[in-house]
Amino acid sequence: KFRSADDESMKIRYEIVEGVLPVSDYNAFMTVKAGPGAGESTVQWVGRFYRVYKLNPPIPEGQDDETALKAVTGVFDDGLAGLKKTLEAK
């Protein structure tokens, strides 16, 4: 769910209300800043979330911290790689 955009700081905020990621209470933002060289940009993507299972151990398989972190890291890595590929093709 889109939360906000700030054109001046080039930042967007969003949250995932429900979906296929094994996380809960997911909130994130992306910021674009000038890169080190001419025509370059740096994208920062930061997310905050909890594993699906919030209670004490034993934690059901697939609902642990490692699973949540691996899933979100995969989304970030794939998303940033796709963004880079798309922008470099222009």
Image (cartoon, grey):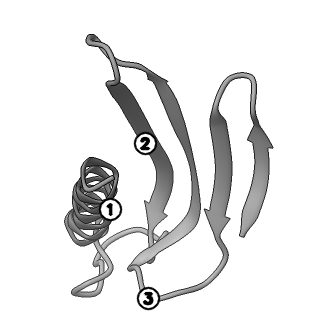
Q: Nearer the viewer, mark 2 or mark 3?
A: 2
Amino acid type of the residue that numbered disc 1 sits on in the rendered structure: Gly
Question: Dividing the image into 4 quarters, which one contains the N terminus?
Answer: bottom right
Q: Are marks 2 and 1 in contact (CB under 8 Å)?
A: yes
Q: Nearer the viewer, mark 1 or mark 3?
A: 1
Neighbour tally class for label 1: few under 14, some 14-19, many 20 plus, Cα within 10 Å:
few
Q: Secondary structure at mark 3?
A: loop
Q: Earlier in the sequence, mark 2 or mark 3?
A: 3
Q: Are marks 2 and 3 in contact (CB under 8 Å)?
A: no
Q: How many marks do you count on the picture?
A: 3
Amino acid type of the residue that numbered disc 3 sits on in the rendered structure: Val
Q: Nearer the viewer, residue 30 or 88?
A: 88
Amino acid type of the residue that numbered disc 2 sits on in the rendered structure: Trp
Q: Residue 75 lies in what quarter of the image?
A: bottom left
Which residue was labeled with disc 1? 79
Q: x, y (%) of residue 5?
A: 76, 43
Q: Is residue 67 left or right of residue 2?
A: left
User: Which residue is located at x 30 percent, y 53 percent?
Assistant: 80
Instruction: Return the residue found at the far front.
Output: 90
Which residue was labeled with disc 2? 45
